[in-house]
Image (tube, helix red, strand yellow):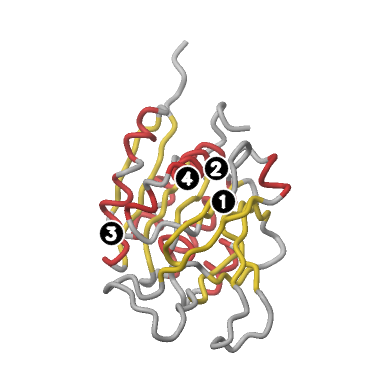
Amino acid sequence: MTTATKKALVVRGGWDGHKPVEASERFIPFLEEQGFAVRVEESTAVYADAEAMAATDLVVQCVTMSQIEREELAGLRAAVEAGTGLTGWHGGIADSFRASSDYLQLVGGQFATHPSVGPGEQRLEGEENFRDYTVHFTEAGRRHPVTAGLDDFDLHTEQYWVLYDGLIDVLATTTHPAEDWQPWNRPHTSPVVWTREWGAGRIVVSTPGHSLDVLDHPTIRTIIERGMLWAARTASAS
C-alpha cells in the first residue's frame, strides 16, 4: 500500500535583507526527503485559494514585514484552524504583517525590537545589533518532540525581544539584561522557540535566523526541521 504524500507550501517574500529565497531553499530538500510534495509561492496570494490550502499539510512562511490582504489572511487562518501546520523562523513568521492584529493573534508572539549593543561598540554594516546571548530550553522544551535532547547554546546575532500571549507553549527563552544605557530597569525574558495549537492546527516559531549562517547552526536547523514535522503531524514527530 502506498502512503499518501504530504503537501508542503513554502511562501516567501517581504524584506530582501532576510534572503527569503536562499533561506527557504535550505529546507526544501529536507522536506522532499521526508516525503513532502513541495510547492513554492512568491506571494501570499495563495492563502486565498481555499482548495489549495485545504490540500496543504504544512505552510512554511518566510515573509518579513510586508502586507497581507484580508481574504489571504482569512484563508490562512481557516486552513490552520482546520489542521494545516504553520511554521517559520525569525522575521519570516514573527515579524510578518505588522498591521494585521488577526495575524498576530494567530501566531501568538510578535517581534518588537532587537536591543542595541553598548554605546561606542563598533559593528560591521548589517551587524549593528548583533549580540552574544544564550538560548535556554525550558522544562517543557526538554520534553517536547521539537526540542527534546538539545542543549542550551550561544549565538552571536540579533536577539529578538518578543511580545507574546499566554496561549503559547514556550520551549526556549533568552534574557535581555538590564544594562545602564537601556530604558528598562530589570531583565526581560523573551521566548525564542514556541509552539501553539490553534483549532486543529499546530504552529511552531523559532526566532533565530537573521542570516544564513544562523540557519546553518546545527541546533537551530534541528529545531526548524523538527518543527516542520511536528506541525505537519508526521509519524516521526508525535
Please name the residue shown 58% across and 81% down the image. 179
Q: Amino acid at mark 3?
A: Lys
For the residue pair 31 and 43, the one nearer the viewer reads as 31
Residue position for label 2: 231
Which callout, 4 or 3, points at the residue further toward the start of the chain?
3
Q: Is residue 147 left or right of residue 52?
A: right
Which callout, 3 or 1, points at the residue further toward the start of the chain?
3
Please name the residue shown 39% across and 32% down the image. 36
Residue position for label 4: 224
Please name the residue shown 44% across and 65% down the image. 71
Q: Quadrant of the C terminus?
A: top right
Mark 4 surroundings within 10 Å by alpha-carbon count, few (fewer than 14), some (14 through 19), many (20 or more):
many
What whole-number distance in Å separates the C-alpha atoms at marks 3 and 2? 23 Å
> Residue 227: image x %, image y %?
52, 43
Please name the residue shown 66% across and 41% down the image. 144
| Marking on residue 46 | none
